[in-house]
C-alpha cells in the first residue's frame, strides 16, 4: 500500500510511520492515498464501512479495529412538503458518525504500535475514540469542556477512558489535550488525517444506497468539518474511480451562535474572525477555531456550495419536526434540516442530510423542548 503524509501548508512529506499530529510549520497533515473502489466486488461484501477495504489506508486486516459498523440506513423525510433523504448516522455503536473516523484512526494507532492515546472533543469524538481504544486494548485519555452533556461523559467513562473536564471554552480543552500530546499519541479527530479517511465512507455508502449515484446536494453540520471533508474525499475517490461524473454541491451548516466559517464565507475573509465560543444548543459544532478552515472553504468553492447559519430557534423547530417523524437525533443534527428549509431546492433535486448524533446523548437538552 502506498500513501504519503504531507503538510497542507508547506508540502513537506513526512515519514509514512510518523506519529506527528501536525507539521513542524504548524500546518495540518493530509494522507495522500487514492482509494480503489470496485462496484462488482461490493456485492460479495458484508454491509459495513469496511466493505470499501481497498479505499481505506490500513495495511493488514489484523490491525483493523471495528464493530462491523456502518451502512447506516437512509430514510425519506418531508420538510415543508419538500423531499429530503436522511442518513441515520445516529445509529452507530457509540451514537454518532464519529465511529467512522475512530475505526480507521484507532486501526492506524494499532498499526503504529501505540499504547496510549489522548483526544479532546465536545463529546462525541471522545466517546468514539474511547470505545475503539477499549476494543483495541489501548489506554485512552479524553479532554472535554466542563459543559459537555452528561450522557456523553458517562459514555466516555464507562468505556474505561480517563476523563478530564476542562473549565472554560472548547479551545481551552483543545489546548489542554495538545499539552498532553507532547507525551502521548494525539488521536485527534481534527488533526489526525486518518480520521478523515474513515469519514469518507459516508460518501461511498450514500452513492451505493442511491443506486450508485451521487446526490445533487449534501448538507453537512460543520464545526471542524470532519464529516464535510471526509464526504468530499469520498466523492473525489468515486470521481477518480470513474464511478460518478461530478461532485455533489456541498453545503456546510453552522449555528449562528458560533459561526466563524459562515462569516469567512459571507464576508470573504482570508483569516478566521475572532469569534467568541458562542452559546448554542448545537454543542457538537460550536467550534470557534476550526483547524482546517481554508480546506473547508476550498471544498465549498470547488463544489459550488455555500455556508448557511441557523439560529437556535430554527434548530429547535427542525428538531421537533425530526422527532415528530419518528426519528431521534441530538440538537446539533437538526441544523441540517433547519438549513434545508433555507435552500431553494427544486422538486426533483436529490438532497441528502445526516442525522449526525443520537438524541439519547442529550436527554437534558431534549427535555427542554417538551415544554
Ligand atoms: C462532530 C459532530 C458534528 C460535526 O462536527 P465537525 O466538528 O464538523 O466534525 C456534527 N454533529 C454531531 C452530533 C457531531 O458529534
Ligand atoms: Zn508544514
Image: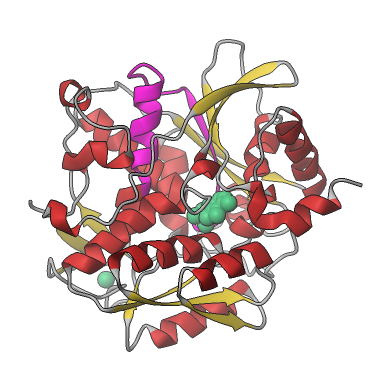
Q: Which of the 4 image quarters holds residue 329?
A: top right
Q: Nearer the viewer, residue 252 or 315?
A: 315
What residue appears at the point 68 percent right and 59 percent down from the top-left corner?
Answer: 258
Question: Which residue in the rendered view is the most extreme toward the top?
Answer: 348
- Residue 221 sits inside the magenta stretch: yes
- Residue 165 sits inside the magenta stretch: no
- Count of numbered circles in the view: 0
In the rendered image, residue 59, in percent from the top left (x then y), is placed at: 12, 54
Residue 268 visible at all = no
What residue appears at the point 24 percent right and 23 percent down from the top-left corner?
Answer: 243
Looking at the image, residue 268 sits to the left or right of residue 311; the answer is: left
Point out the quarter of the image occupied by ligand 2: bottom left
Magenta span covers which residues? 199-224
Q: How is the image coloured?
A: secondary structure
Residue 182 visible at all = yes
Q: Which of the 4 image quarters holds residue 308?
A: top right
In the rendered image, residue 208, in percent from the top left (x then y), is placed at: 34, 24
Q: Nearer the viewer, residue 29 or 188?
A: 188
Amino acid at each position: 500500500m502506498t500513501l504519503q503524509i504531507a503538510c497542507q501548508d508547506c508540502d513537506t512529506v513526512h515519514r509514512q510511520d510518523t506519529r506527528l499530529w501536525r507539521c513542524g510549520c504548524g500546518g495540518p497533515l493530509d494522507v495522500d492515498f487514492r482509494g480503489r473502489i470496485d462496484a462488482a466486488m461490493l456485492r460479495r461484501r458484508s454491509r459495513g464501512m469496511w466493505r470499501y477495504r481497498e479505499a481505506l489506508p490500513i495495511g493488514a486486516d489484523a490491525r483493523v479495529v471495528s464493530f462491523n459498523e456502518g451502512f447506516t440506513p437512509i430514510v425519506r423525510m418531508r420538510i415543508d412538503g419538500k423531499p429530503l433523504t436522511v442518513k441515520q448516522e445516529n445509529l452507530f455503536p457509540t451514537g454518532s458518525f464519529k465511529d467512522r473516523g475512530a475505526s480507521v484512526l484507532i486501526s492506524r494507532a494499532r498499526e503504529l504500535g501505540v499504547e496510549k492515546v489522548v483526544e479532546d472533543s465536545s463529546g462525541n469524538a471522545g466517546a468514539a475514540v474511547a470505545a475503539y481504544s477499549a476494543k483495541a486494548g489501548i489506554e485512552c485519555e479524553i479532554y472535554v469542556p466542563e459543559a459537555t452533556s452528561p450522557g456523553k461523559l458517562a459514555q466516555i467513562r464507562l468505556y474505561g477512558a480517563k476523563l478530564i473536564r476542562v473549565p472554560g471554552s472548547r479551545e481551552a480543552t483543545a489546548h489542554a489535550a495538545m499539552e498532553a500530546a507532547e507525551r502521548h499519541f494525539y488521536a485527534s479527530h481534527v488533526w489526525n488525517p486518518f480520521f478523515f479517511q474513515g469519514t469518507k465512507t459516508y460518501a461511498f455508502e450514500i452513492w451505493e444506497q442511491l443506486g450508485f449515484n451521487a446526490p445533487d446536494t449534501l448538507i453537512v453540520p460543520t464545526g471542524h468539518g470532519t464529516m464535510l471533508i471526509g464526504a468530499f474525499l469520498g466523492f473525489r475517490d468515486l470521481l477518480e474511480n470513474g464511478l460518478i461524473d461530478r461532485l455533489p454541491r456541498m453545503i456546510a451548516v453552522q449555528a449562528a451562535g458560533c459561526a466563524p466559517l459562515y462569516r469567512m464565507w459571507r464576508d470573504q475573509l482570508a483569516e478566521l474572525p475572532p469569534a467568541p465560543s458562542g452559546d448554542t444548543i448545537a454543542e457538537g459544532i460550536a467550534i470557534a477555531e476550526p483547524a482546517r478552515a481554508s480546506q473547508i472553504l476550498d471544498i465549498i468553492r470547488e463544489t459550488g456550495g455555500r455556508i448557511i447559519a441557523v439560529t437556535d430557534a430554527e434548530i429547535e423547530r427542525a428538531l421537533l419536526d425530526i422527532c415528530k417523524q419518528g426519528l431521534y437525533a441530538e440538537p446539533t443534527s437538526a441544523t441540517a434540516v433547519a438549513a434545508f428549509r433555507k435552500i431553494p431546492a427544486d422538486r426533483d433535486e436529490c438532497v441528502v442530510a445526516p442525522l449526525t448524533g443520537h438524541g439519547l446523548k442529550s436527554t437534558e437538552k431534549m427535555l427542554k423542548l417538551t415544554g
